[in-house]
Image (spheres, coloured by chain):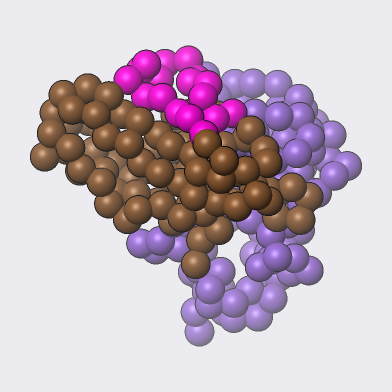
Amino acid sequence: QSALTQPPSASGSPGQSVTISCTGTSSDVGTYNFVSWYQQHPGKAPKLMIYEVTKRPSGVPDRFSGSKSDNTASLTVSGLQAEDEADYYCSSYAGTNNFVVFGGGTKLTVL
Amino acid sequence: EVQLLESGGGLVQPGGSLRLSCAASGFTFSSYAMSWVRQAPGKGLEWVSGISSGGTRTYYADSVKGRFTISRDNSKNTLYLQMNSVRADDTALYYCAKDGALVTPLYFDSWGQGTLVTVSS
């Protein structure tokens, strides 16, 4: 069982927006602004999409955005494209006992 | 361009040992914390261990504490993971990951392609 809770699946049609949630606790997401999101295509390494809740690394399209409220973080993908179909994982710093925790992953399907 | 190249994976018997390596290039290796993250077949990501940029601080997930040892050689731009007393549930693809911070594992902005560790008799 993963430390952070994500829905196993999400979907949307091209051009639409989809939001993936990531629920933690006051020991991780709720306390630290070190939530990150990773995209993983089949057979590939994960790729950082969002870090520190809302920041996008260079090269990541601005269609990807992050937010956080209380113990829940969210990733929103706007203007869905076929290449966005992948698994998405959230992660949070969890203090000096657990350091980094991941969610179980969400499979995003572009219909 | 950041490159991380893992090696050392393979088939190991339960209770055995294995040492993974990660050769880094394209960035100032000694300026960043590094981590190992694993992914069991068909499963999600699990952070395993991290090390500060200077190598003086090490961090472990409870699942590997006391069995795995992380280290680095900044003169060789190489990260290591010594795996002892391995168990079947250590079977996974092990990724080397560059952290975005200096000291504590926070988030991972570059990943290698992984090296597969299979624990089986």
Instruction: Farthest residue to the front: give it.
Output: A70
Would you say residue A57 sits in the magenta stretch? yes
What residue is shown at x 78% (from left), y 50% (from top)?
A96
Q: How many marks on residues?
A: 0
Instruction: Farthest residue to the right: give it.
Output: B56
Would you say residue A96 sits in the magenta stretch? no
Q: Based on the displayed image, in which of its 4 quarters is residue B2 positioned?
A: top right
Where residue B68 appears, as percent x and y from the top left, is 72, 63
* Residue B84 visible in rendering: yes
Is B21 on the left-hand or right-hand side of A109? Answer: right
Magenta part mainly helix, strand or loop?
loop
Q: Is residue A110 above or below residue B37?
A: above
The residue nearer to you, when weighing A73 against B8, is A73
Where residue B76 appears, as percent x and y from the top left, is 74, 34
Is B3 on the left-hand or right-hand side of B70? Answer: left
What residue is shown at x 64% (from left), y 21% (from top)?
B27
The residue nearer to you, when weighing B23 against B113, is B113
Is A105 on the left-hand or right-hand side of B28? Answer: left
- Chain in brown on the image: A
Start-end of magenta stretch: A52-68
Where residue B103 appears, as percent x and y from the top left, is 79, 35
Q: Based on the displayed image, in which of its 4 quarters is residue A109 positioned?
A: top left
Q: In the rendered image, which quarter contains the C terminus of chain A?
A: top left
* Residue B92 visible in rendering: no
Determine the colour of chain B: purple
Where residue B83 appears, as percent x and y from the top left, is 68, 64
What residue is shown at x 57% (from left), y 37% (from top)?
A35
Instruction: Farthest residue to the bottom: give it.
Output: B121
